[in-house]
Image (cartoon, rainbow, N blue to C red):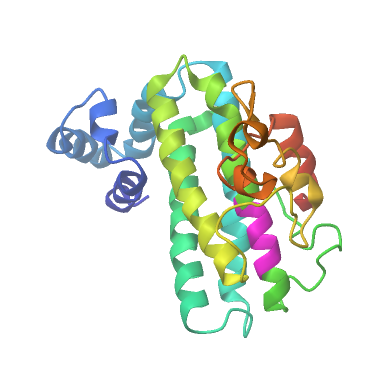
Amino acid sequence: MNLQNILNEIEQVDADMYERLDHVSRRHVFSNFLKKAMAGAAPVAFAAILNKSYAQNSSVADVLNFALLLEYLEAEFYNKGLAASGLIPSGAGRTIYTQIAKHENAHVALLQSALGGAAIAKPAFDLTYKGAFADVLTNYQTYLAVSQALEDTGVRAYKGQAGALISAPAVLTVALQIHSVEARHAARVRMLRGQKGYIVNADSGGVPAAVYAGEDNVTQGGVNLVSATGYSMARVTEAFDEPLTKAQVLAIATPFLA
């Protein structure tokens, strides 16, 4: 267990992590871990401290494990994609996917550490989506399409769980920090496919339509913005993203489970 690397990875996605911990300074954290490491108890101490800060109740732990399932899937998808010979061409695509993979693996490390012993184990995945995308690891265009589905689903999934984290503001802050990074991933992947960086209407763009269910909504705060502004439906829907419920996300993600 490389504590330095894990702390660095977590800090990349949570710049305020030391403020969330009981031990308010980096020096104090490392001093404490050094003593624990000498006694062979550093991993246990690390998980315990983060658990106290992030997984304070069962409902929050459920949300974190839900997020962890999605992050496991995304990390697996990008790790295997980058390892597949001849799949991702050199240049912009490979540079972008290499960076996205680093982010997704950091998200997994963060959530595992936050949950400690309560973290779900990584399941086995079927990246072909039960055969619907059979050539996902040999055809770059298929890989791009599935990547878009994963990222757009991830953005909407984090948004859908925000309400469940109101009672745990520290966890909500971390979730929103991950959410905005997932949104940047989605925009980059969509542009690699030659699409707009934002979702227009409920256009699935060749991926499962369930990923974009409800994205054609034009009413915000009780106001129909097409009627109120005179803008087109496409222009209004581009300006807003809609959340997905946990049930909707699980329905989309379940075919990825082996």
Q: Is residue 190 visible?
A: yes
Decide which of 8, 201 is in the foreground and name it.
201
The residue most toward the left is 27
- Horizontal and vertical percent for residue 41? 33, 35
Above or below for 163 versus 180? above
The quarter of the displayed image where residue 53 is located? top left
Which residue is painted at 67% across and 77% down in the image? 140
Quadrant assignment, res 237: top right
In percent of width and height, residue 119 lies at 55, 34
Q: Residue at x 55, y 43 (%)?
A: 239
* Furthest residue in direction front, as rendered: 230
Of residue 22 and residue 202, the one placed in the foreground of this image is 202
Q: Residue at x 63, y 51 (%)?
A: 199
Would residue 121 be seen by someone viewing this image from the given angle?
Answer: no
Main SS class of the magenta portion in the image? helix
Name which residue lies at 24% across and 37% down: 33
Indicate the position of residue 73 as horizontal and vertical percent values: 64, 52
Q: Which residues are magenta?
A: 144-151
Residue 5's spot in the image, x, y percent? Answer: 31, 53
**243 is higher (above) or lower (below) than 258:** above
Is residue 93 part of the magenta span, yes or no?
Answer: no
Work out whether residue 18 or residue 236 is closer to the camera in this orientation and state it.
236
Q: Is residue 184 above or below residue 166?
A: below
